[in-house]
Amino acid sequence: MRRPSRPIRGALLICLVTCLIHAGPQAFALPDSPTVEELFSSRVLPEPLVPFGSEPTAANNQTLAIALTVFDQRSVADDFSVLEAISL
């Protein structure tokens, strides 16, 4: 039985590490029409998003998803303006 040579293992390891480095952090993404559960588990904010009052509409969820996506891409860490601007 033939054993794999060490250079191939080393090349695979280098390729894997390079791919991980260049991939960077996973981008935040929500579906176009997210459900309440998907918004709850989005984890953009330190605490989960929990609806209160009446059940949010699909339009409410879509508006919030867009705002969370923009918020996640902000360049200033304490800029909450996009979240403050929406009214659901």
Image (cartoon, rainbow, N blue to C red):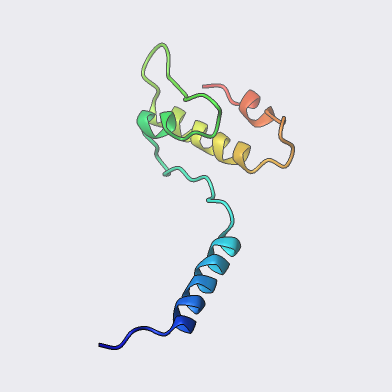
Asked if 33 appears above or below 24 in the picture, the reply is above
Which of the two residues, 40 or 20, is positioned nearer the viewer here? 20
Q: Height in image: 65 above or below 53?
A: below
Picture quadrant where residue 50 is located: top left
As drawn, is 84 to the left or to the right of 54?
right
Q: Residue furthest right?
A: 76
- Residue 30 placed where, x, y %? 45, 42
Query: Which residue is at a point 72% across and 42% down the rendered structure image?
Result: 75
Task: Residue 39: give x, y in percent of width and height.
Answer: 43, 32
- In the orientation shown, which residue stands out farthest toward the left? 1
Q: Is residue 52 left or right of residue 22?
A: left
Q: Is residue 86 found left or right of 53 in the rendered image? A: right
**Residue in the foreground of this view, choosing between 69 and 48:** 48
In the current view of this chain or complex, which residue is farthest to the top?
Answer: 53
Residue beneath the point at 38% across and 28% down? 36
Residue, x 60% and y 40% (percent of image)? 72
When the figure is inspected, residue 12 is found, relative to residue 85, above or below; the finding is below
Q: Could you tell me residue 56's position as x and y percent?
A: 40, 22
Residue 46 lies in quadrant? top right
Residue that appears at 51% across and 78% down: 11
What quarter of the picture does the N terminus occupy? bottom left
Total marks shown come to 0
Place residue 82 in its image quadrant: top right
Q: Position of residue 34 (x, y in %)?
A: 40, 37
- Say which of 52 and 44 sits in front: 44
